[in-house]
Image (tube, rainbow, N blue to C red):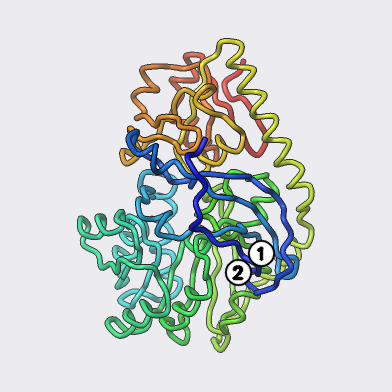
């Protein structure tokens, strides 16, 4: 499907978290395009490129990670993800902002968010009274900061950038990094940045896709080059301890089909760990990685067979939601343009573009509403309840959703 095999990637020999060379291969996806590498039709001949994608797990610290690293400028130079296109995320961060400002007495104090994207959390932080500064390399963030009027450093967060912020604004009461921790090859550079910025009694709060949910609900579609690491709490404890940080609280949240919100502090801080930390560490010892691997391969076979059978029966099939998950789902399951007519998406940034690898067009929702295909593969299945509530007309007129994970289900069948 792709036009060539690039040479600009690196293969790891050691764990990104603990440095161990004891890595176990779990899943070899083969050659996969970049999950967010949506292209204009005229760009297909030059940008439709694939990279190796292999998921490994560190036997020593349990960190799951992709073996092959693509340069970040390849991934983020045309990054088009905007958090504020999803109502679930807007509501989640609207609640989180005032919650953490209140809990950690941050009104009038510095809060730094790296990976701030289009300001979906920056706005609630500012409204709650914090002095908020964002850090993000994307043009999505730059445009949002200019339009909304909040402070931004357009850069990758690290010790150097943290030093610049500290010199200009002082130390931070809170450092926040939601859904970013998993995207960085040198995670230690980020943590060094956190320790550079943090007040003695300050806190580092971050949300990250949780390895426990990935395993339990067979989320093979969330593995892609942009998502470099998939954290267990055990891996995070060891990682942060190397930088004199301790985890004081953790809780599971439903965002992105299963994440954790982790709160860490300096090891010298007076803050004590909650019982939830020990409870989750004990639970992780029971995770069945071998079962996860078997189920991934089974889901791949089942999805391809189901869609193929529907098409052979004359049914029309599209996909709903052009997120990164969709790119991996369709490419790994070999669901190309001969099986899936188009992908609808709510983000205008993607309209008219092509899904890499499978070369399926992305269209605005009005096409779907005017068209009424027989089936829509819910590639954004992690927002199932939101989508089903929104698309009742499609279901009432006989349309059906195929929900691929955690179990393959058809929504709308009588």
Residue at mark 2: 16
Q: Residue at x 36, y 22 (%)?
A: 367
Q: Is residue 276 visible?
A: no
Vertically, is 72 above or below 159? above
Residue 63's disc number: 1
* Among numbered discs 1 and 2, the one appearing first in the sequence: 2
Q: Quadrant of the C terminus?
A: top right
Q: Secondary structure at mark 2?
A: loop
Vertically, is 40 above or below 14? above
Vertically, is 87 above or below 168? above
Q: Residues within 10 Å of mark 1 (few under 14, many from 20)?
A: many
- Nearer the observer: mark 1 or 2; the answer is 2
Q: Residue at x 42, y 45 (%)?
A: 37
Q: Secondary structure at mark 1?
A: loop
**How many numbered discs sit on the rendered protein?**
2
Q: Is residue 126 visible?
A: yes
Query: Depth check: 269 or 190 in front?
Result: 190
Determine which quarter of the picture holds residue 148.
bottom left
Vertically, is 319 above or below 405? above
Q: Residue at x 52, y 70 (%)?
A: 186
Cβ atoms under marks 1 and 2 closer than 8 Å? yes
Q: Is residue 139 left or right of residue 235?
A: left
């Amino acid at each position: 499907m792709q036009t060539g095999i690039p040479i600009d990637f690196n293969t790891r020999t050691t764990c990104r978290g603990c440095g161990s060379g004891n890595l176990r291969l779990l899943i070899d996806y083969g050659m996969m395009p970049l999950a967010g590498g949506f292209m204009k039709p005229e760009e297909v001949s030059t940008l439709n490129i694939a990279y190796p994608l292999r998921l490994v797990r560190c036997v020593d610290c349990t960190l799951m990670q992709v073996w092959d690293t693509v340069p970040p400028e390849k991934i983020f130079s045309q990054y088009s993800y905007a958090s504020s296109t999803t109502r679930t995320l807007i509501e989640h961060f609207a609640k989180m902002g005032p919650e953490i400002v209140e809990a950690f007495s941050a009104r009038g104090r510095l809060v730094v968010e790296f990976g701030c994207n289009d300001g979906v959390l920056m706005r609630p932080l500012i409204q709650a009274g914090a002095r908020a500064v964002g850090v993000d390399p994307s043009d999505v963030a730059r445009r949002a900061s200019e339009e909304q009027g909040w402070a931004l450093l357009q850069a990758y967060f690290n010790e150097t950038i943290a030093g610049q912020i500290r010199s200009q604004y002082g130390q931070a009461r809170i450092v926040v990094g939601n859904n970013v921790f998993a995207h960085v090859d040198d995670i230690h550079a980020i943590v060094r940045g956190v320790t550079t910025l943090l007040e003695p009694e300050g806190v580092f709060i971050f949300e990250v896709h949780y390895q426990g949910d990935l395993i339990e609900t067979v989320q093979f579609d969330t593995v892609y080059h942009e998502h470099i690491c998939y954290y267990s709490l055990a891996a995070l404890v060891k990682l942060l301890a190397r930088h004199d940080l301790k985890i004081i609280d953790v809780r599971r949240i439903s965002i992105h089909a299963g994440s954790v919100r982790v709160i860490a502090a300096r090891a010298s801080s007076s803050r004590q760990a909650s019982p939830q930390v020990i409870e989750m560490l004990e639970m992780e010892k029971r995770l069945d990685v071998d079962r996860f691997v078997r189920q991934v391969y089974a889901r791949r076979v089942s999805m391809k067979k189901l869609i193929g059978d529907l098409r052979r029966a004359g049914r029309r099939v599209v996909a709903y939601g052009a997120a990164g998950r969709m790119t991996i789902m369709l490419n790994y399951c070999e669901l190309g343009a001969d099986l899936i007519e188009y992908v609808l998406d709510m983000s205008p940034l993607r309209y008219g573009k092509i899904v890499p690898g499978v070369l399926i067009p992305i269209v605005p929702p009005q096409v779907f509403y005017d068209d009424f295909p027989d089936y829509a593969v819910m590639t954004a299945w992690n927002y199932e309840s939101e989508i089903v509530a929104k698309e009742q007309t499609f279901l009432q007129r006989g349309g059906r959703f195929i929900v691929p994970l955690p179990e393959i289900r058809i929504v709308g069948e009588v």
